[in-house]
Image (cartoon, rainbow, N blue to C red):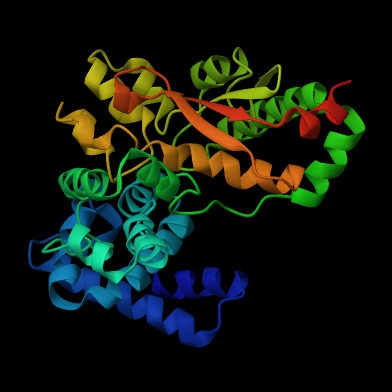
């Protein structure tokens, strides 16, 4: 580990000395763990990262989040993008089931919450994400049996994990100026431009590499990104989690696996073990879009998954239903 250079890198990112010392300690502890197998941090296989996070889960799970923050900063410092992708694999939506646990309590009470989660502690951050779908199946099956389909959808629809900050004031202003159709088109152009920059710089779009094939795949379909309008509905397609791997995969189960972002279900597609218990889980994904458009319109919309990888489709398509009186002023 290039400790001095890494310290300088963190200083330039305005990290304070206490945080820097914490990250260095985490990385030194990891290096000691690797030394037992004659391995070193700078040449570690990213797929082996989960061995250590699962070790931390077993010994002191409170350390996992700090470790992942330390390792992703070090990966950014060394430009080890494969390692960044693996950190995202492990940490993506890690709090989703904690949110569901709390939301069931808030809406339906402790007795029902405890019945649904009986003998099923939520897998903590750091557990191999491909172990999570079996947990999800059990919880969703119990939830639907106890609460019914509509209540389960209502629990999932607000999204279980939130989304990064959006420029809501800026997008509202642009929407008023352009109208909805030109706004959606401009957002797609912005997306393509951002992907082109990632390609040119060799950097990641979230957890994936970008090349000409990926850009063309996304450029030719405006539904990727913010979508297109049909009447009072905006139709959106999710960009695959790993677009290049999706395009290259030959087996349909692997294509579906590479489409999906959610570690709580995606492993089931890889293993061909999806069942009806997971049928409604993509309302959470639809809710990710709802969070944005509710703020844009200052009015709740209805977000509905139309076709998803969980259902066996080779795309994830979401319908965003906007009340006529809300969207009409923006149709120009």
Q: Which residue lies furthest to the right in this view?
A: 177
Measured as percent of width and height from the top left, residue 141 is found at 20, 43
- Can you say whether 27 is above or below 148 in the image? below
- Residue 88 shown left or right of residue 206 in the figure: left
- Pick whichever, 215 or 105, lies toward us: 105
The picture places residue 231, in percent across and down from the top left corner, at: 71, 17
| Of the pair 124 and 296, the residue shown nearer to us | 296
Residue 159 position (above or below residue 2): above
In depth, the one of 198 and 256 nearer the eye is 256
Residue in the picture at 14% in, 30% down:
273
Q: Which residue is drawn at 54% across and 68% down?
A: 9
Residue drawn at 47 percent across, 56 percent down? 76
Whole-percent x and y of residue 259?
Answer: 37, 28
Q: Is residue 96 left or right of residue 16?
A: left
Res. 21 image quadrant: bottom left
Counting from the top left corner in percent of width and height, residue 277 is at 22, 36
């Amino acid at each position: 580990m290039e400790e001095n250079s890494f310290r300088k890198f963190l200083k330039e990112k305005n990290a304070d000395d206490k945080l820097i010392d914490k990250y260095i300690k985490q990385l030194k502890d990891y290096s000691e763990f690797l030394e037992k197998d004659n391995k070193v941090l700078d040449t570690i296989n990213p797929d082996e990262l989960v061995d250590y996070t699962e070790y931390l889960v077993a010994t002191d799970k409170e350390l996992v989040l700090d470790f992942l923050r330390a390792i992703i900063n070090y990966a950014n410092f060394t430009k080890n993008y494969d390692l960044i992708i693996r950190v995202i694999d492990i940490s993506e939506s890690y709090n989703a089931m904690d949110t569901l646990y709390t939301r069931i309590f808030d809406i339906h009470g402790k007795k029902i919450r405890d019945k649904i989660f009986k003998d099923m502690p939520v897998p903590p951050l750091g557990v191999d994400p491909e172990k999570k779908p079996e947990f999800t199946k059990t919880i969703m099956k119990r939830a639907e049996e106890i609460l019914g389909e509509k209540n389960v959808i209502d629990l999932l629809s607000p999204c279980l994990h939130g989304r990064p900050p959006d420029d809501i004031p800026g997008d509202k202003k642009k929407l008023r100026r352009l109208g909805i159709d030109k706004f959606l088109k401009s957002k797609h152009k912005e997306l393509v431009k951002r992907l082109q920059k990632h390609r040119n710089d060799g950097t990641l779009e979230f957890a994936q590499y970008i090349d000409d094939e990926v850009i063309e795949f996304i450029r030719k379909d405006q539904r990727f990104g913010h979508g297109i309008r049909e009447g009072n509905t905006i139709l959106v397609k999710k960009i695959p989690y790993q677009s290049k791997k999706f395009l290259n995969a030959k087996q349909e189960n692997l294509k579906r696996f590479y489409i999906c972002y959610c570690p709580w279900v995606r492993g089931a597609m890889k293993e061909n073990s999806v069942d009806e218990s997971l049928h409604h889980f993509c309302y959470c994904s639809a809710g990710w879009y709802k969070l944005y458009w509710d703020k844009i319109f200052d009015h709740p919309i209805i977000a509905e998954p139309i076709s998803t990888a969980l259902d066996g489709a080779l795309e994830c398509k979401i319908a965003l239903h906007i009340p006529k009186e809300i969207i009409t002023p923006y149709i120009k």
